[in-house]
Every structure is written in C-alpha cells, then in structure tokens.
C-alpha cells in the first residue's frame, strides 16, 4: 500500500507539476488583486500606453499562434490533403484553447470586463475594426468548439451527437477560414489608426496583409512545434497512424512554411520600398528591423527549405521554434517595442512583474488543459469505435477486428 502511495506521489511531484502549481498559485493571487484593485493596482499601463503585454502577447500572439486550427483544417478538408489528417485534431485543440485563453485574457485587460457583451447586445459599432475583431473571435471560438466537439463526444460516448458534429465539418472549416482571414488581418489594421505612434518601418498600409500571412506561418510552425512536444511527452497516447504520419506532417508543413516565409519576406521588402523607408535602416530601429527580417524570417525560410529538401525532421522541428519566436517578436515590435518610439525612455511602457505573471499563468493553464485533454480524449489516436468507415471492410479482408 505504502509503495502505491509513494509511486503516486512520485507521479504527482514531478518538476513540471511543481513549477505549474507555483505559477497557478501566484496567478490566482494576481487575479484577485487585478479584479479587486483594478488595472492601476498591478499594471504599468497609462494613457500613452493603454495596450500592454496583455494585448501584445495574450491577444496578438495568442490569436496568431492559434492559427494552426484553420490552416490544418483548410489543408485537409478544403484542399483535400488527406495525408495530414492525423494533425487536424491536435491543431484544432491548440486553436480552441488558444482562442479560449485570448477571451479570458481580455477580461484582465478590459477595464470593465462585464461590458464585453455590449458591442453585440447594446451598441453594435459595425464600422469599427475592434467590433469586427470581437465578432469574428467570438464566432470563431464557437466554430472551434464545434470542430473540437467530436473528440469530446466520442469520449462521452454520445454517438448520434458525434455523427452530427462530423457532418458539419466541411461547413465549419470554410466558415472558420473566412472568419480567420477577417480577424487575423483586422488585428493588424487596428494599428493603422496610430501612424504617428508606430515606427515607420512597422507602420504600413499593408499591416493587415502582413498579419494575415504571418498567421499562416505561425499556424504551420505551431503544428510542427506542438507535434514535436506531443511526440516527446505524449508518445504513449499515439496510435500507429499518428506515429506513421508524423514525419510526413512535419515535412509537408515545413515545406509550406518555407514558401510562405519567403513570400512574406518579399512583401515586407516591397513594403519598405513602396514607403521609401531605406534611410531608416541605418538607425537603431533599422538594425532591430533587420534582426527581425533576417534572423526570424529569412533564416527560418532557408532552414525549413534545407530541412524539407534533405528530409531532416530534427532541423525542421528546431526551425519551428525559431519561426514561432519570430512571430512573437513581430507582434511585440508592432504593439510594444516600435510603438511610441519617439517618447523619452521614462515615458515608455515596460510590463510590470504582475502583468508578466498573469501572462505566464494563462500560458500554463493552456498547457495543462492541452495535456489533460490529450491524455483523456481521442486527440492523438483514433477512437476504436469510430475508426474510419472503410476500416471494417479492411478488417474483414485481413480477418481480424480492433
């Protein structure tokens, strides 16, 4: 008996669980402080800098990195790339959790979170970009929930509801792609209202296009990154199909990411040329812009290409980390680093420890939720009772059943 208890304790008291537990405890305390003391109690936000890391990281980065859902669904269901089918559920789950946490993060950032439904119910500002972002995120979160629901319904054993949800797949995928195209680009368009605040190298009429295209890069790279983590830590949950298709997914997505990164690099250069901004490249901000462009766009494009050509899975997986960091850097540059660039240093925004703590708390919640769901629901394997419809025929032919 004591042996069982110590074994269970050993499973619970892993370094990962202990660190997560500490972050969650601090997060709960910070949440109480935020919702009792207001924004001023814990943030460095001001009238000059009303949007801080909670918008820059939790929202802009969160929405970009959750793009794997629409990218993968579109590839498999719209463009018929069935060989990537095993990547759909993990990608949709990552997307769903990402958007859910974006909505949770908004409650921290908005001064009066109970008024979040106002734009829908009381005063719809249909000409406002922010209204469009809000409406699309709310609708797309619903779409992601419905796309994710077959896995949950299989786990709960609700066959009829599950079959109905599966029939909606194509419709939901198309709807999801349309909504994503709209709000991924609109998040960039939000910054078009601040031409005097955002540094000219990042301020461009093409911001909506840049945000949309970089979200595709983020989506492809996140699928690769998340699949490498799942392989490492949830390997025992995968079935043969997932293990067999995994390398193909990494290669295919790496090849696609290389091409999209290259295209993104070209249109960023066109943006600099069309605004005749070459002289800014000789400044400090220009050097930083080149770091982003060469180190986090051109380099991952090249590494993805080499990895795909030489079928080097490890290289592609490491490159996905670089590409994801590049997306985070880009969103930070637009919303924080190159924003209010002309203000003196003491008036610039830097996040407080409490703000960083809340962001860390939300990321930890996402990782724990993913781990729990992937460990319990048919995400990384096919539910034996719901294997593909052609399976019974194949089983008859080979003479054995699941």
Image (tube, rainbow, N blue to C red):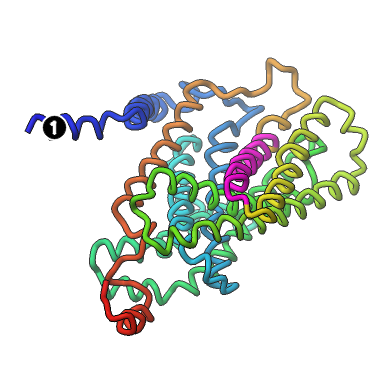
Q: Position of residue 189 (x, y in %)?
A: 70, 49
Q: Report x, y in % for residue 362.
A: 43, 37
Q: Residue at x 73, y 31 (%)?
A: 338
Q: Write the residue at 36% across / 41% down.
A: 368
Q: Does the magenta-highlighted stretch encompass residue 323?
A: yes
Figure quadrant of residue 381: bottom left
Look at the picture and state if 3 lies above or below 138. above
Occupied quadrant, residue 342 = top right
Is 167 located above or below residue 138 in the figure? below
Q: Quadrant of the N terminus?
A: top left
Quick one: quadrant of the C terminus? bottom left
- The span picked out in magenta is 312-333
Q: Residue furthest front?
A: 398
Task: Judge whether residue 36 can be spotted in this image.
Answer: no
Q: Residue at x 67, y 46 (%)?
A: 190
Secondary structure mostly seen in magenta is helix
Q: Residue 189 vs residue 390: left or right?
A: right
Q: Which secondary structure lies at badge 1?
A: helix
Along the viewing direction, whichever of 60 and 131 lies nearer the viewer: 60
- Residue with the mark numbered 1: 5
Is residue 234 a member of the stretch shown in magenta? no
Q: Residue furthest top?
A: 346
Residue 206 position (above or below residue 14):
below
Left or right: residue 221 versus residue 386 is right
Q: Which residue appears at 74% of the width and 39% of the height?
A: 194
**Residue 229: percent from left, percent from top:** 46, 44
Give x and y (percent) for residue 273.
Answer: 90, 46
**Which residue is more in the foreground, 211 or 4?**
4
């Amino acid at each position: 008996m004591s042996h069982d208890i110590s074994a269970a304790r050993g499973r619970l008291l892993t370094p990962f669980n202990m660190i997560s537990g500490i972050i969650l405890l601090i997060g709960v305390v910070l949440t109480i402080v935020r919702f009792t003391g207001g924004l001023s109690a814990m943030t460095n936000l001001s009238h000059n800098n009303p949007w801080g890391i909670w918008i820059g990281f939790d929202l802009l980065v969160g929405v970009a990195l959750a793009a794997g859902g629409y990218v993968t669904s579109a590839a498999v269901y719209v463009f018929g790339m069935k060989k990537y089918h095993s990547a759909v559920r993990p990608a949709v789950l990552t997307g769903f959790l990402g958007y859910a946490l974006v909505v949770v993060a908004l409650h921290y950032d908005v001064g009066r979170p109970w008024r979040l439904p106002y734009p829908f119910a009381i005063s719809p500002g249909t000409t406002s970009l922010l209204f469009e972002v809000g409406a699309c995120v709310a609708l797309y979160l619903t779409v992601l929930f419905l796309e994710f629901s077959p896995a949950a319904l299989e786990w709960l054993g609700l066959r009829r509801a599950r079959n109905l949800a599966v029939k909606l797949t194509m419709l939901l995928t198309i709807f999801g792609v349309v909504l994503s195209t709209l709000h991924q680009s609109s998040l960039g368009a939000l910054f078009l209202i601040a031409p005097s605040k955002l540094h000219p190298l990042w301020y461009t009429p093409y911001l909506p296009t840049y945000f949309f295209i970089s979200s595709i890069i983020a989506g492809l790279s996140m699928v690769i990154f998340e699949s490498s983590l799942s392989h490492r830590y949830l390997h025992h949950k995968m079935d043969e199909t997932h293990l067999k298709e995994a390398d193909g997914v990494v290669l295919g997505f790496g090849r696609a990411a290389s091409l999209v990164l290259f295209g993104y690099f070209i249109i960023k250069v066109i943006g600099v040329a069309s605004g005749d901004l070459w002289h800014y490249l000789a400044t400090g901000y220009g050097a930083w812009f080149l770091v982003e462009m060469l180190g986090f766009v051109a380099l991952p494009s090249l590494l993805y290409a080499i990895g795909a050509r030489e079928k080097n899975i490890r290289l592609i997986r490491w490159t996905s980390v670089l590409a994801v960091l590049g997306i985070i850097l880009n969103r930070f540059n637009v919303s924080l680093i190159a924003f209010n660039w002309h203000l003196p240093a003491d008036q610039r925004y830097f996040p407080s420890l409490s703000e960083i703590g809340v962001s860390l708390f939300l990321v930890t919640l996402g990782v724990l939720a993913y781990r729990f769901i992937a460990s319990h629901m048919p995400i990384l394997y096919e539910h034996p009772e719901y294997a593909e419809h052609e399976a019974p025929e194949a089983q008859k032919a080979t003479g054995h059943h699941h």
